[in-house]
Image: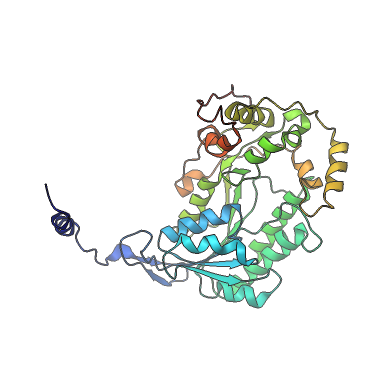
Amino acid sequence: MFSKYQLLRIQRAIVVQRKRALHDLATLPGRKAVVSQGTPGYSAVSGHVVTVFGCTGFLGRYLVSKLARMGTQVIVPYREEDEKRHLKLMGDLGQIVPMEWDIRNEDQIAECLRHSDIVYNLVGRDYETKNFKYADVHVTGAERIAKLASELGVQRFVQLSHLNASPDSTSEFYRTKFEGEERVKSVFPNATIVRPAAMYGHEDKFLNNMAIWPIWWKLNYGETKIRPVHVLDVAQVLANLMGISQLPGTLSLPGPRTLSFEYLLDLVSAVTYNPPSRAPVLPKRMALAVAKAAQAAWWPLICPDEVERRYLDDVTVPGDWDAVGVIPDEIENHAISYLRRYRSADNFQRPVVLPSRLT
């Protein structure tokens, strides 16, 4: 048996001190040199400085975690002090740099991206408020960030959109997402547009919402077809873009399968061992009326535009996962991780039984 001291000496003898080499040098599109240092990982230095607007959102926190784990210095713009505290722990000392910002303040935006070589804009609104309409955030705000990034010489710009972004959509959310893409490309021609489908994960408003408010997912009799994607897969795609020198254009990121709301409700019921909801299917006019009335509340359960989206199928386009080296996961592989909390104590350890697939 070796002592602890002897094991440490053996480990030091086996692990050769890593020295800088040619593979540590990366050249950005503007010929700026980026030199990494140290063994890749949490305490390394990748040489990149990245700004993630929307870092406190559902997708943003996972992207920040993946970037910081690669040794990247991440600028995390925030609006509320309490919303960014957990991000500080995702990187080593000095890697996570919080900076206060407002989407209407150009000076604050410029300060957040002044030293960055890649900027991610993940900012979005699920519903409108009196201070921020869809166009204020998805169009004007995105254009403002991209314009300042271009003027300050930022090398890469990544704009998050949606798989269903379209100028002809009946949903204002999807229309403004498309208009935001066009505005960004007009001021930053080499921008990368990322279009993921609806995302699910631990804090999502997808599987969790189905378990709590199934009545809103029975609209259109559950016949709406969507292609959900795991939030960690989308975050990995965004993180991988940092290592790709140039990838302009649009990346579509649909889930691996097309599923109906009816199947997803059956999946939630089967995984949680809770009986299917007996709530009636609301007519569209009644659902819109309820949503408009609920919008007056401080925290609306659902907005009218979201009701409209529940009647729209996801577009049928091929995925661009191969271009970024990611294979998307099936939702059944992760459903139990996010839905076990809704099981009763008697059913908590019971096996997972999946329903038959309905497409």
- The quadrant of the image that shows the C terminus is top right
Task: Tell which of 36 and 179 is nearer to you.
Answer: 36
Q: Residue furthest left?
A: 1
Asked if residue 131 lies left or right of residue 123, the reply is: right
Residue at the extreme bottom: 107
Q: Residue at x 79, y 55 (%)?
A: 298
- Tally the marks: 0
Colouring scheme applied when the structure was drawn: rainbow
Rendered residue at 47%/49% (across/down): 324
Check the image and report above or below for 293 versus 313. below
- Residue 36, position as x, y percentages in the image: 35, 67
Q: Is residue 107 above or below residue 120?
A: below
In this view, the residue farthest toward the front is: 345
Residue 331, horizontal then vertical, whole percent: 55, 35
The answer to which of 65 and 165 lies nearer the viewer is 65
| Res. 346 image quadrant | top right
**x%, y% of residue 316?**
64, 37
Relative depth, front residue between 185 and 272: 272
What residue lies at 82% left-to-right and 52% top-to-bottom? 297
Residue 53 appears in view:
no
Q: Is residue 115 visible?
A: yes
Residue under the image location 78 percent in, 59 percent down:
133
Percent position of residue 198, x then y: 63, 43
Can you say whether 6 is above or below 316 in the image?
below
